[in-house]
Image: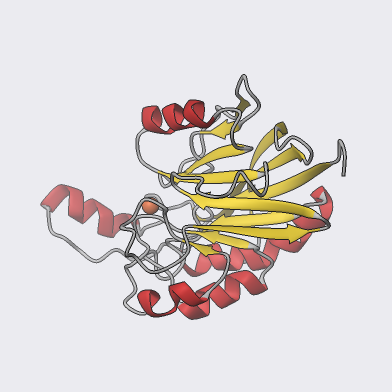
Amino acid sequence: MQGRNFKILFIGDVVGRPGRNALKRSLNDIKSRENILFTIANCENASGGFGITYSAVDEIFSAGVDFITLGNHTWDKKETENFIGEVKNLIRPANFSPLSPGNSFSILEKDGILLGVVSLIGRVFMRKKTNNIIIDFHAEATSEKKALAYYFDGKVSAVFGTHTHVQTADECILRNGTAYITDVGMTGPYDSIIGNNIEDVLIRFLKGIPRRLEVANKDIRIAYVILTIDAKTGKAVEIKRYIEKIEGV
Ligand code: FE2
């Protein structure tokens, strides 16, 4: 184990069926090409653009994802509160109410390496078990994301921002060894307004009519980062970001 590096694949906001199809189409290739040990995906928009159903959870784990993280749309599907507590490695934000159902963090072991994943803030109980910790910080404001990353610098392996659906070009490793990117970006339809049908969103903005938003379906891409971690220290060794077009979905 000493001095051994391992790689994490972190996929940005998976939107609707196009996003789920992108996972099914590309995960095996990326994982074998990059020799990935753990895969994490933010999937709070995975079902119809808002929330996540049990069948989508099942589909995403079957596609090869190890941890699913959520965000502000966690409860958008009524059924979610009934199953969320039963599904290991399905992680809702830690700073919801303490009475909220569901896991706020999860730890998984593979090849003798333990990885902990937290959604939003909080690293409760985890540093005693492993130094390898990923935080998905699901937030809008760049300054808030960067501030949280510096707050955790040297204490976790990475702080990855999600939620804005636009990948930022600021990936880096901070001074004490925590990798950071403000936003990993979106996995879903790019001929859209952050995943939604353009006409629906324009009507909302122009006329102020609260139209129900549908997921768009053209120009499907997957957005992700690959992080290499030193298994002994939990510190980041390398971070790379990608957006790839998915053909034929
Ligand atoms: Fe979000």
At 79% from the left and 38% from the top, the residue drawn is 232
Q: Quadrant of the C terminus?
A: bottom right
- Residue 131 is situated, as x and y percent measured from the top left of the image, at 67, 41
- Foreground pick, 229 / 55: 229
Relative height, residue 207 to residue 160 (above, below):
below
| Among the 4 quarters of the image, the one containing residue 148 | top left
Relative height, residue 235 to residue 211 (above, below):
above
- Foreground pick, 115 / 10: 115
- Residue 63 is situated, as x and y percent measured from the top left of the image, at 66, 70
- Residue 39 is situated, as x and y percent measured from the top left of the image, at 67, 56
Specify whether residue 37 is in view. yes
At 13% from the left and 58% from the top, the residue drawn is 209
- Foreground pick, 79 / 192: 79
Specify whether residue 12 is in view. no
Q: Quadrant of the N terminus?
A: top right
Whether residue 181 sits left or right of residue 109 in the image: it is: left
| Among the 4 quarters of the image, the one containing residue 107 | bottom right
Whether residue 32 sits left or right of residue 220 in the image: it is: right
Relative height, residue 137 to residue 62 (above, below):
above
At 24% from the left and 51% from the top, the residue drawn is 202
At 57% from the left and 77% from the top, the residue drawn is 58
- Residue 31 is situated, as x and y percent measured from the top left of the image, at 77, 56
Whether residue 183 sits left or right of residue 4 in the image: it is: left
| Number of numbered discs visible in the structure rendering | 0
Q: What kind of colouring is applied to the model shown?
A: secondary structure
